[in-house]
Amino acid sequence: MATENTTPAKAPRAKAETTAPKKASRTKEPAKDGAATKRTGKPKAPAEPQAKGPTKKEQIIEMLRSPDGTTIDAIVARFGVQRHSARAAVSVFGREVGGVSYDKASKTYRATAA
């Protein structure tokens, strides 16, 4: 004799007729200049641009233009990049300085144009 499932099938639940009104969504908008912030109540000071140092590109070009030139290892150590990225930078930035020469003995790259 086969056993039959004796549990009754569940009827689908009916949706509630009344729904609660939706709350207005809050949007986080930055405080306007001189406006008080919500947390501190103090007005925010406008951000002043800070003096930036030379970019990586400018530093690599400077390294290439130095009398001793530079090595891939020096670029990797200074900027913490991968060796293939350092070689790509020398290739790209070398075009901007008028070309780069490579000394196989010392593995040094130098800008060929002043």
Image (spheres, rainbow, N blue to C red):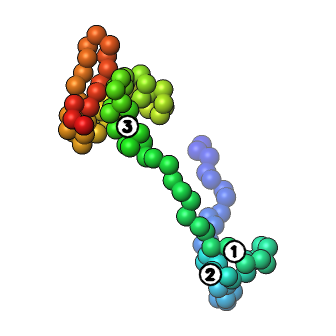
Name the residue located 67 percent from the left edge and 82 percent from the top edge: 34
Q: Out of 50 and 4, give the one closest to the viewer.
A: 50
The image quadrant that residue 43 belongs to is bottom right
Residue 62's label in the rendered image is 3
Residue 13 shows in this picture = no
Q: Out of 89 and 15, give the one closest to the viewer.
A: 89
Q: Which residue is mark 1?
A: 44
Residue 32's label in the rendered image is 2
Please identify, in this view, whether the residue under mark 3 or under mark 2 is nearer the observer.
3
Q: Secondary structure at mark 2?
A: loop
- Judge the density around disc 1: few (<14), some (14-19), many (≥20) Cα neighbours within 10 Å: some
Name the residue located 31 percent from the left edge and 16 percent from the top edge: 107
Q: Out of 21 and 62, give the one closest to the viewer.
A: 62
Disc 3 vs disc 2: Cβ atoms closer than 8 Å? no
Disc 2 vs disc 1: Cβ atoms closer than 8 Å? no
Q: What is the x, y in percent for residue 67?
A: 34, 26
C-alpha span from label 1 to label 3 = 39 Å
